Image: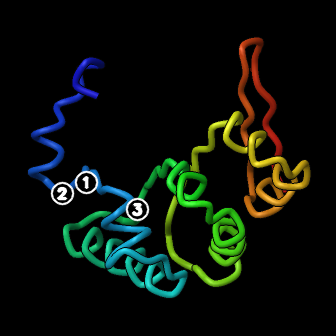
């Protein structure tokens, strides 16, 4: 972000930017729990609102689930987010297409697309945007 001219230090000091490790968020205490992750989302939102923000914008790189061989849990989590979490959040879940393809389940793409309200697929020649 700094290489793009973003004043990271200023935004971190104001609370407008937090960078969290997946180990401290998705795998807190060394294990993954949908319920605990949902509680963490709520805590982060409450902290943001207490600082005067209207909501929370988040991006997450989902590679850790592939690395830990927890794709089934990932799909369950992504589906639960839209069923359970009624919070003012704007979230981007980032996936590496090669990781999804290497998983060997052709249906995994469809599972992940169904779990999200909007999908952006990019590639070397452009992208596709779809809303559900």
In the picture, residue 111 is in which quadrant? bottom right
Q: Quadrant of the C terminus?
A: bottom right
Residue 60 x/y as whole percent: 48, 52
Residue plotted at (18% across, 36% down): 8
- Residue depth check, mark 2 versus mark 1: number of the one nearer the observer: 1
Q: Earlier in the sequence, mark 3 or mark 2?
A: 2
CB atoms of marks 2 and 1 within 8 Å: yes
Residue 2 x/y as whole percent: 22, 25
Does residue 100 appear to the left or right of 47 in the view shown? Answer: right
CB atoms of marks 1 and 3 within 8 Å: no
Residue 21 x/y as whole percent: 32, 56
* Residue 56 disc label: 3
Q: Nearer the viewer, residue 60 or 8?
A: 60
Q: Quadrant of the N terminus?
A: top left
Separation (CA) of disc 2 from disc 1: 7 Å
Q: Earlier in the sequence, mark 1 or mark 3?
A: 1
**SS category of the residue bearing label 1:** loop
In the picture, residue 9 is in which quadrant? top left
The residue under label 1 is: 18
Does residue 64 appear to the left or right of 121 in the view shown? Answer: left
The residue under label 2 is: 15
Q: Nearer the viewer, residue 35 or 90?
A: 35
Residue plotted at (51% across, 76% down): 87
């Amino acid at each position: 972000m700094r290489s793009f001219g973003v004043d990271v230090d200023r935004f971190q000091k104001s609370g407008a930017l937090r960078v969290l490790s997946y180990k401290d968020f998705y795998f807190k205490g060394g294990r993954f729990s949908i319920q605990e992750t949902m509680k963490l989302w709520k805590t982060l939102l409450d902290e943001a609102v207490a600082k005067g923000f209207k909501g929370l914008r988040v991006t997450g790189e989902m590679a850790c689930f592939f690395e830990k061989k927890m794709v089934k849990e990932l799909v369950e989590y992504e589906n639960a987010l839209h069923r359970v979490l009624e919070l003012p959040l704007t979230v981007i879940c980032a996936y590496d297409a090669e990781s999804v393809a290497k998983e060997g389940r052709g249906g995994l793409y469809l599972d992940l697309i169904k779990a999200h309200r909007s999908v952006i697929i990019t590639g070397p020649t452009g992208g596709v945007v779809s809303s559900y």
